[in-house]
């Protein structure tokens, strides 16, 4: 076989192995999704819709200072739930949930502080104070004690909608991540170099 034919064959092999590895990497990418419901955090971890992460390690960090708050493992359905940490309530910061699955796969999800504490929105107190009394067409006034709970519920609902929007955007990301692609390319280039070395030795 000529040197040109050998190089062409290796290039074709390189191309198909690259496609195979990157496709396989995407198929096994791990995903984690977390949200607040009441005073509890719920997480769901999965490789795909039908394949959940069993006994995956979960670490929860405080986004304000990076402190590790707690650890746990997913159940057979890929779920791991925990109450909102007291430290997070005090610091009123967000949470970073990191998932470690089999074969070194890792995924993470961040819950911003404004989703955990909807009342943190700037100017909320000022806005609420300007709506302590609302006049209806009949001239009746709504007490501020009735407005406050409704306003809080509205903020919580908005936070949940934002969480769902982020989940949808995350799910629409197609193809393997950049790190996975470059790792696959590096591995294949290594194999390519070894093959070229042995071919040159034979000559």
Image (cartoon, grey):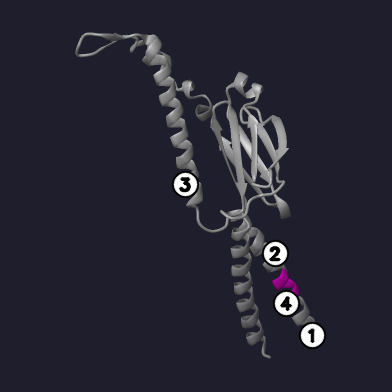
Residue highlighted by disc 2: 187
Residue pointed to by mark 3: 169
Q: Residue 80: x and y, percent?
A: 65, 39
Q: Residue at x 64, y 77 (%)?
A: 13
Q: As drawn, is 17 to the left or to the right of 151? A: right
- Residues at circles 4 and 2 in contact by the CB criterion of under 8 Å: no
Mark 1 or 2: the one toward you: 2
How far across and down, in percent of the image, does residue 34 sit?
A: 57, 38
**What stretch of residues is rendered in magenta?**
191-195
**Residues at marks 2 and 3, CA–CA distance in whole angstroms:** 30 Å
- Determine if residue 123 is in view: no
Please give the name of the residue rendered at 46% of the width and 27% of the height, measured from the top-left corner.
156
Q: Nearer the viewer, residue 125 or 4?
A: 125
Marks 1 & 4, CB-CB < 8 Å contact: no
**Which residue lies at the image location 60% right of the left edge and 43% below the top edge?**
44
Where's the C terminus, which quadrant? Answer: bottom right
Q: Would you say residue 127 is visible in this rendering? A: yes
Nearest to viewer (mark 4 / mark 2): 2
| Dots 1, 2 in contact, CB < 8 A | no
The disc placed on residue 202 is 1
């Amino acid at each position: 076989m000529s040197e040109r034919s050998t190089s062409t064959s290796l290039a074709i092999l390189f191309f198909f192995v690259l496609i195979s590895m990157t496709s396989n990497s995407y198929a096994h990418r791990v995903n984690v999704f977390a949200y607040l419901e009441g005073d509890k955090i719920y997480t769901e971890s999965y490789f795909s819709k039908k394949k959940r992460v069993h006994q995956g390690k979960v670490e929860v960090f405080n986004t304000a200072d990076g402190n590790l708050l707690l650890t746990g493992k997913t159940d057979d359905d890929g779920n791991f739930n925990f109450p909102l940490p007291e430290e997070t309530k005090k610091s009123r910061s967000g949470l970073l949930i990191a998932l470690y699955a089999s074969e070194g796969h890792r995924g993470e999800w961040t819950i911003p502080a404004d989703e955990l504490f909807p009342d943190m929105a700037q100017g909320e107190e000022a806005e609420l104070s300007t709506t302590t009394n609302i006049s209806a067409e009949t001239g009746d006034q709504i007490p501020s004690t009735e407005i406050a709970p409704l306003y809080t519920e509205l903020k919580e609902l908005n936070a949940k909608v934002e969480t769902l929007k982020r989940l949808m955007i995350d799910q629409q990301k197609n193809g393997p991540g950049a790190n996975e692609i470059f790792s696959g390319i590096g591995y294949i280039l290594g194999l390519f170099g070894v093959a070229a070395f042995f071919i040159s030795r034979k000559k």
